[in-house]
Amino acid sequence: MHADVGAKVLVTRYLPGRLVLGHGAADEPETYRQAGALLASLHAQDPHPDPDHERRENAKALAWLDGTHRIDTRTEQRLRSLVASWPAEPVIVVPTHGDWQPRNWLVDDGTVRVIDFGRADLRPAMTDLTRLAAQDFRRNPSLEEAFLDGYGSDPREPAAWLRTRVREAIGTACWSYAVGDPAFEEQGHRMVADVLDEA
């Protein structure tokens, strides 16, 4: 509603609704169609090239691997070699949410709304699909079809999408170990195995 950049203040209003996660709407294609349309509106704002994004993201992935985790040594070496082989070319970045999934969507009388922009940043558009692909799209492909229908296109270029998913898998496995979330860590290890099968 209001913002003051100098004061670093952003005023919002309360959004009514119930979390989609744990609600019947989490399995309804219409929810994902609306979420796709909302995300397309967010991504349409201020696209521009970033010459350093890939380099920064590769460095973050390697930094996760430098820390304490439970990725086995052989898998870690495969991941390191893969990341080291990637180009660091400029990419187009847009405003992204950073955690676009049902736990950050509300449904209010059939209308989907979005909350929690705490991870918002300028990134390639496809990065907002990583968590959906690892969870919701994986369990029900019709949700992916509905989401892309709402979005209007598919922003995932195959080579860049693989790089994005590898980095997300590394981050998930390492972060969840660091915070003591074994269920999420298990998902991270599955994500690592899935992307290495494709690499």
Image (cartoon, grey):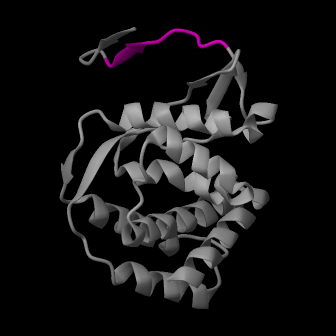
Q: Residue furthest bottom?
A: 74
Residue 48 belongs to magenta span: no
What's the magenta region?
Answer: 8-16
Q: Position of residue 46 (x, y in %)?
A: 23, 35
160 relative position to 131: left or right = left
Name which quarter of the figure residue 81 lies in: bottom left
- Asked whether 62 or 131 is in front, the reply is 131
Name which quarter of the figure residue 120 lies in: top left
- Asked whether 50 or 39 is in front, the reply is 39
Q: Position of residue 151 (x, y in %)?
A: 46, 41
The count of marks equals 0
- Magenta region's main secondary structure? loop
Q: Residue at x 59, y 13 (%)?
A: 15
Q: Position of residue 147 (x, y in %)?
A: 56, 43
Looking at the image, residue 117 lies above or below residue 182: above
Q: Residue at x 54, y 81 (%)?
A: 198
Asked if residue 118 shows in the view, the reply is no
Q: Position of residue 96 (x, y in %)?
A: 40, 40
Asked if residue 153 shows in the view, the reply is yes
- Quarter of the image that includes the N terminus: top left
Q: Residue at x 51, y 87 (%)?
A: 78
4 relative position to 154: left or right = left
